[in-house]
Amino acid sequence: RYKYSQNNNLRFSTYCGYKENTEIVTQQILDSIYSFLLFTFDFGYRFTSAQKETLEELENDDDALLDKKFKFILDTVSKNKLYAKYKKTNDDDSKDNSSDDSKEDNMPIFDCGIEFYYWQDTEKGVKDNKWSIKPKYGSFKEEIEGNKYGLNKDQWNDVMIKSESLLKTNMAKVLKATSYFADEYAIEHRSPITIQHIVALLLYTNFRRLRNALNGTYYAETKDETVESIKGRHSEFGCFGRYLRECVELWGWQSDDSDAPSMYYFGFNKICLFGSTIPKIYSPLLTTASINVSLLSKKQNGIIISLRPYQQFL
């Protein structure tokens, strides 16, 4: 339904003839609640009590038990028709979106991306920094609506209304900026999260085409691409990149938080090598603390990468 919300005709028919942003956002929220309560079991994102007991018995770092755990998860959910339908669509999308370099014989090295700086008036973001970014657009709204991968006016209004609702929740109210990066990013310590940062999160998690376009600007397109060319491409998302990074580093979990997961997983669409066992990853990642979610989201020929905290960070 997020996909259809970009086309006015499809938007009208998908949302039962409604055009008002508030009504459409309400339907989207109800969709999320319904999907979480019902389809998370059908797809294998959540397990029954009996299935959880079996998984707990296989909870061990031993490779043999880990293989049995993966097999149990896949065997359990592969019997479900909804999962089979979803998996086929997911794998078809993977083929459609695969790049030419996936056909190379050599195993690629995982690219950790470029660490851009957006804070022109702070000590860390000095203007002569090699990767300092000046946004192409004058505001976040102009950037998202003006970008060829972005949203139309109705979609932007949908996201804004949903963000305003989330900002009023108790979960959002307890979020306070940590001191570690606050001074460097010119954001006051323990300040509340802003609506722009929530908007950035919703855009990244809910709009795949926009997310992929942003992710692509963290890497050189060719070995010979110049610094100015890379910065020019990323400046198309200068506000988006900044708000997303601030959201994670100022209001996100730190590894020493009591509620923070001990392990994170993410899927990669090809087998690759890492240059280090303690990599610094600068491009955004969609991760999960649930191994079964990562297994079910993995592309047909992809791999699952696990991340453990290192010192204060992942």
Image: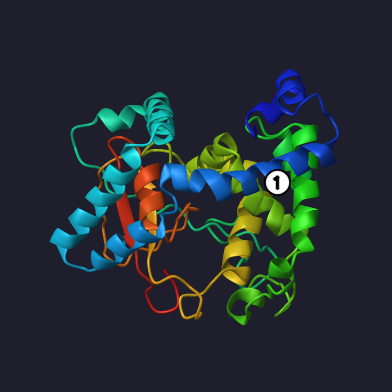
**For residue 116, above or below residue 160:** below
In this picture, residue 203 sits left or right of residue 141: left
User: Which of the 4 quarters of the picture holds residue 193?
Assistant: bottom right
Query: Can you see residue 136?
Result: no
* Colouring scheme, one of rainbow, by chain, secondary structure, one colour: rainbow
In this picture, residue 241 sits left or right of residue 288: right
- The mark total stands at 1
Image location of residue 22, percent across then percent down: 84, 42
SS at badge 1: helix
Image location of residue 99, percent across then percent down: 37, 29
**For residue 104, above or below residue 292:** above
**For residue 37, above or below residue 194:** above
Of the 4 image quadrants, the one containing the N terminus is top right
Q: Nearer the viewer, residue 286 or 82?
A: 82
Which residue sits at x=70%, y=21%? 10
Q: Nearer the viewer, residue 68 or 261?
A: 68
Q: Nearer the viewer, residue 275 or 13?
A: 13
Residue extending furthest toward the top: 9
Which residue sits at x=35%, y=37%? 299
User: Which of the 4 quarters of the picture holds residue 57?
Assistant: bottom left
**What amino acid type is highlighted by mark number 1?**
Ile
Mark 1 crowd level (few <14, some 14–19, many ≥20, 10 Å Cα): few
Of the 4 image quadrants, the one containing the C terminus is bottom left
Image location of residue 126, percent across then percent down: 62, 66
Q: Which residue is mark 1?
A: 29
Residue extending furthest toward the left: 64
**For residue 309, above or below residue 76:** below
Q: Nearer the viewer, residue 289 or 270?
A: 289
Residue extending furthest toward the right: 20
Query: Can you see residue 44?
Result: yes
